[in-house]
Amino acid sequence: MRVVDLSRVLAGPLCGQILGDLGARVVKVEAPNGDETRGLGKAGPEGSAPYFMGLNRNKHGIVLDLEKESDRETLHALIAEADVVIENFRQGTMERWGFSYEDVLASRYPALIYLNISGFGWSGPLAGLPGYDAVAQAVSGLMAINGHSETGPTRVGVPVCDISTGLFATIALLAAWSHRKRSGLGQRIDASLYTSGLSLLHPHAANFWMQGILPGLSGNAHPSIAPYETFEVAGETLFLGVVNDGQFVKLCRVLGLERLPEDSRFKRAADRVRHRSALHELLAQALTRRWHGDLWRDLMAAGVPAGMVQSVEESLRSDQTRALGMEPEDGFFGVPFPVRLSRTPATQRLRPPCLTTPATKA
């Protein structure tokens, strides 16, 4: 697969990087001032911030000023040899440069797969408006369910709308690639941060459409499961994820609460949700009595999903991360592709491109 990646910031570059990890030849096209993420943070020896370096491996680089006719001709030459184009410009920008998919590219390159990523999609009252991750989190409803009563609505600490858009777009693009293999025809793909945000509203969207249930701020608790939340014990934070009755019985056995599953308030999952506060208090007391540094491991060994809340450093440097090959190789800084393929594994081949001034073909 040959990809021309015209996108900037996160969702589009992530899609291009995934394709590059899996073996595609990706050419990243940047304006003379570069992808803005090159300046989002302290620059490293390569001259760009970690934000850029974590999203643009396995890409060749080229600098084009698309306000110049000669550079637009160079882009046409790149697209003529490409299978895929990725772009996330404001609505009308590609048309102004003479690269309208409907009016130009579809007829000139009928096998081309054209991916557009936007903030709010291709129609409706918000179409064409600028969109960034936190804005999409706010407008899609994600922010309204994240946080506590003390904090109010809170942005998720990672750009989930951007990342999920990059993932959904990659899935759609691979489906289009499969269709092209059979038909020889490309197609247009439109992905947006807003629709991706909506898709993340599970189970809240299903609860609403099916039963009219409106969620509030969820904190660390699950709206339909208990105990599925954090517990503060001995100055540390433990997460328990007990989904079914069998796991609850095992939890109570480890904590010396063998009779608790027979309590009418806690017999079934729905009962435990209704009496969440009382259950939390009883479990917190038992955890304090039984606490030691490896209690979470004892719980896991007994079949109870549990884990300590680790810092980013603890997680990135953990034995588990190392065992799964999730540390970047020398010269790379982003987390490697997270899925292992036995025959066609993802690779870290090319470091992110430097920003060069000549508009030469990569």
Image: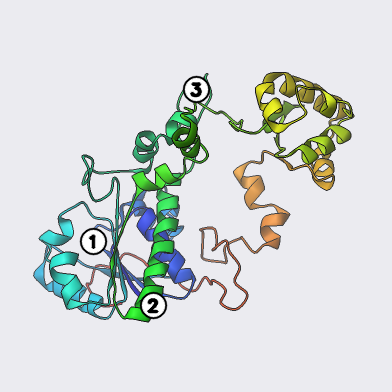
Mark 1–mark 3 Cα distance, whole angstroms, equals 40 Å
Residue 141, horizontal then vertical, whole percent? 40, 34
Position of residue 172 in the picture relative to residue 124 (left or right): right
Colouring rule applied to residues: rainbow
The disc placed on residue 151 is 3
Dot 2, crowdedness within 10 Å: few (<14), some or many (≥20)? few
- Earlier sequence position, callout 1 versus callout 2: 2
Q: In this picture, is 94 found above or below 82?
A: above
Mark 3–mark 2 Cα distance, whole angstroms, equals 46 Å
Q: Which residue is mark 2?
A: 1
How many numbered discs, if any? 3
The mark closer to the camera, 1 or 3, is 3
Residue 68, horizontal then vertical, whole percent? 11, 66
* Residue occupying image coordinates x 51% and y 63%: 332
| Amino acid found under the numbered disc labelled 3 | Thr
SS at circle 2: loop
